[in-house]
Image (cartoon, rainbow, N blue to C red):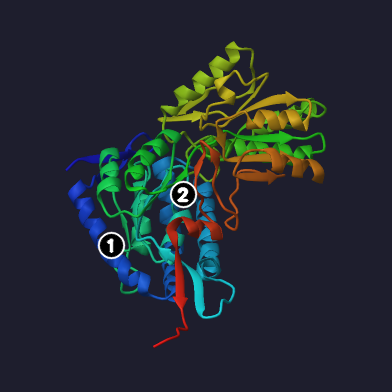
Amino acid sequence: MSSFQVVNPFTNRIDRSYSLHSFDQAQKCIDQSCQAQKPWAKSTLTQRINLVHDALEYFEAHRIEIAKDITLQMGRPIRQANNEIDGFFERANYLCNTAESALKPTILPDKPGFERRIEHAPLGTIFIIAAWNYPLLTAVNSIIPSLLAGNSVILKHSSQTPEIGLHFERAFGQLGECQHLLQSLFLDHTTTGQIIESCPINQVVFTGSVLGGQQILSHTAKKFIQPVLELGGKDAAYISDQANLRLAAEGLIDGATYNSGQSCCGIERAYVHEKVYERFLSLLTPLMHDYQLGDPLDEATTLGPLAQAKQASLLKEQIQQAKAQGAKVLAGGKEQQIEEAIFWEPTLMVDVNHQMPLMREENFGPILPIMKVNSLDEAITLINDSDYGLTAAIYTEGDHEAEQFAAEVDVGTVFRNRCDYLDPALPWGGAKQSGCGCSLSQFGFLSVTRRKAIHFQTKTTGD
């Protein structure tokens, strides 16, 4: 049996080793999952909600351990790892609270002699493939709706953060009398594809790269599964001449650098109205120097190492290409090595344009390029000039231009005077290469259920 190792991004030492599941082992687990799903689906929704609520207590009881595992395996500062646990509870509790209204049958208007309704039936076994950058949040978005709707779950967590997958299994593996409801498997890409194509998997939810999404789609297409794909972004912000500039500066810097820039919906490009451009830059630059790089287990650290040191080469390449085309670095712009870890300094750049990969290709680093624009219309045109469409933010005190911005940008989520935050009451999904389908909110339940039409004739005539 082959295995893999997780390397602590800060110490560059092996954190833990894990054995990969073979296809035969995975198939056995999936068979168990299918058997567990049948009685689980027959339980009442109220029973399922109560049991899931009870299982959530595991995460509070093990909060310190889970936060430390996030930090050791992907390098996020420990106090930010604790923030992720808070976000986990916000989403999980909201989904539990909205499940009854989201899953209740739709009753059609009366038709004499007939009963008609639309039920939201569970799909069966849901295969969730979660990402490392937010190891709790990328998984909880679909795990909770899947279980509440009456499905079982096979979870493949990232090979960067497999310990988080085990925490989910410990919490949700057995609910009431139903065992094997959630199983965490350690799989390579080949086995993952075999499972989708050959095993009784009824839905796939994937969070990751565009390339990964394309590979998943090639497997699901063979079974006519329409997967939920939560992919990358090149998210943008526009700072209007009607903006509260200090609010915008603080929000933008946090949106670009939080989690070392390793966020799908982090801000990777910004457009600033020419009337406030210089003043805005004067507010941004000092904020870039406020971050404390260091040991992520230290409470004083506010920016951790890159989870994967190899990412530094892409960041360096994008910056060098941009500089060769005339861009300037106002802050940061290079990597730092602290002990065995590779950090990337929070970076502010100007004199950029859309001929530069820096403005077009996702980089997953704490880099904020700023481009001057002369109008809202120009900003919208540039924001839409992208293969991605996850989120976009506008900073303005003007209601009219906020509404115009929201109507015309081609993205899944539009923010005003904030960015880089998921409200669990709102659907989370993207446009273009940022993916398809959605999670969170009442609409996230649609991805893990199917519409079942009930058409009863209740009155008959004749002999």
Q: In the image, what residue occupies the spot 46% across and 72% down?
A: 455
Q: Residue furthest front?
A: 462
Q: Nearer the viewer, mark 1 or mark 2?
A: 1
10 Å neighbourhood of mark 2: few (<14), some, or many (≥20)?
many
Query: In the drawing, does residue 182 fall left or right of residue 140?
Result: left
Foreground: 225 or 67?
225
Task: Examine the rendered structure and indicate whether residue 1 appears above or below residue 337.
Answer: below
Q: Picture coordinates of residue 6 (x, y %)?
A: 32, 40
Disc 1 is placed on an element classified as helix
Task: Examine the rendered structure and indicate whether residue 32 appears above or below residue 267.
Answer: below
Q: Which mark is residue 138?
A: 2
Foreground: 449 or 205?
449
Q: Which mark is residue 452?
A: none
Q: Picture coordinates of residue 445 (x, y %)?
A: 49, 60
Q: In the image, what residue occupies the spot 59% across and 44% down?
A: 412
Query: In the drawing, does residue 183 fall left or right of residue 149?
Result: left
Q: In the image, what residue occupies the spot 77% across and 27% down?
A: 277
Q: In the image, what residue occupies the spot 46% across and 78% down?
A: 457
Query: In the drawing, does residue 387 fall left or right of residue 228?
Result: right
Q: Which residue is mark 1?
A: 34
In this orientation, does residue 398 appear?
no
Q: Which is nearer the N-term, disc 1 or disc 2?
A: 1
Q: Residue type at mark 2?
A: Thr
Image quadrant occupied by the N terminus = top left
In this orientation, does residue 433 appear?
yes
10 Å neighbourhood of mark 1: few (<14), some, or many (≥20)?
many
Question: Where on the picture, by quarter, is residue 334?
Answer: top right
Q: Picture coordinates of residue 409 (x, y %)?
A: 66, 38
